[in-house]
Image (spheres, rainbow, N blue to C red):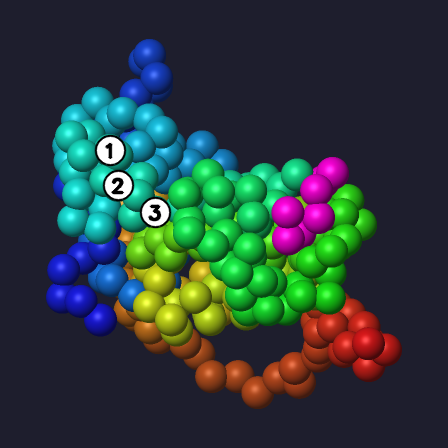
Amino acid sequence: MSSTPAIEVTALTKAYGDLDVLRGVDLTVPAGSIHALLGSNGAGKTTMIRILATLLRADGGSATVAGHDVARESALVRGAISLTGQFAAVDEILTGRENLVMVGRLRHLGDPRATADELLERFDLTDAGGRRVATYSGGMRRRLDIAMSLVGDPTVLFLDEPTTGLDPQSRQEVWRTVRELAGRGTTVLLTTQHLEEAEALADCIAILHEGRIIAEGTLADLKRLLPPAKVEYVEKQPSLEDVFLAVVGSRS
């Protein structure tokens, strides 16, 4: 893992008219890590991702991604990143393979078909590669969307609420995919409202509230912010999600 941060944000600000969305955000994301950005609706998560992805210009402060300034070196930043939004940006008329080949051609790859086949295998979509995406499940579409974002081997991947609208089984599939990406050295900045998602995936968690980072650290670090836990002996019952995954898994 490189000692140079993949993402470095200092005193970042952004306002829409009289509404201050980001009010001096500081954030450092080590290379090769999964960093979760938690916050409720309106906290500024998507605005921050859009600034880092060069889709929006900050009002103040500075930010670098993969060593490049997002304001002055936007083309270099775009060449080093990929962004997956809240909803899968796939063409339902095309097949999964055709979607990947199209992105490969847009990125001017030498052999986009070979890249498409490698990503289909990597994301367990080879058997579905020749089918139109309209026939895919939600989890399959999201896996394809993430696969498309990896065409060209970006070093930094922004995932903006990647499991929005997914059922529990599909959400588990996406979690597995994100873990594999980090294991291969990709830096992932993940925004989410789901606390269990950050708990399951993130090496480090930052809480964004009213435009500022109000807490940051590992899960253990954040738990130490609370009073010591009181030990009680209770019978743990399985959650409905546990039951759903067990039942569905037993029939697959």
Q: Position of residue 54 (x, y in %)?
A: 31, 32
Q: Name the element at disc 2.
A: helix
Left or right: 117 with respect to 235?
left
Which residue is nearer to you in this view: 216 or 58?
A: 58
Residue bearing mark 1: 74
Residue located farthest toward the top when viewing the structure as drawn: 17
Left or right: 40 with respect to 48?
right
Residue bearing mark 2: 77
Question: Is any part of residue 143 visible from this angle?
Answer: yes
Density class for disc 2 (Cα within 10 Å; few <14, some 14-19, many ≥20) is many
Density class for disc 3 (Cα within 10 Å; few <14, some 14-19, many ≥20) is many
Residue located farthest toward the front when viewing the structure as drawn: 110
Magenta-highlighted residues: 92-98
Residue 81 marker: 3
Instruction: Locate residue 50: give its quadrant.
Output: top left
Residue at screen point 17% across, 26% down = 60
What distance separates the C-alpha of mark 1 from that of mark 3? 11 Å
Q: Position of residue 27 (x, y in %)?
A: 22, 49
Q: Are marks 1 and 3 in contact (CB under 8 Å)?
A: no
Q: Position of residue 179 (x, y in %)?
A: 46, 70
Which residue type does callout 3 highlight?
A: Ile
What distance separates the C-alpha of mark 2 from that of mark 3? 6 Å
Q: Are marks 2 and 3 in contact (CB under 8 Å)?
A: yes
Residue 103 marker: none
Instruction: Locate residue 206: give its quadrant.
Output: bottom left
Above or below 36: residue 105: above
What distance separates the C-alpha of mark 1 from that of mark 2? 5 Å
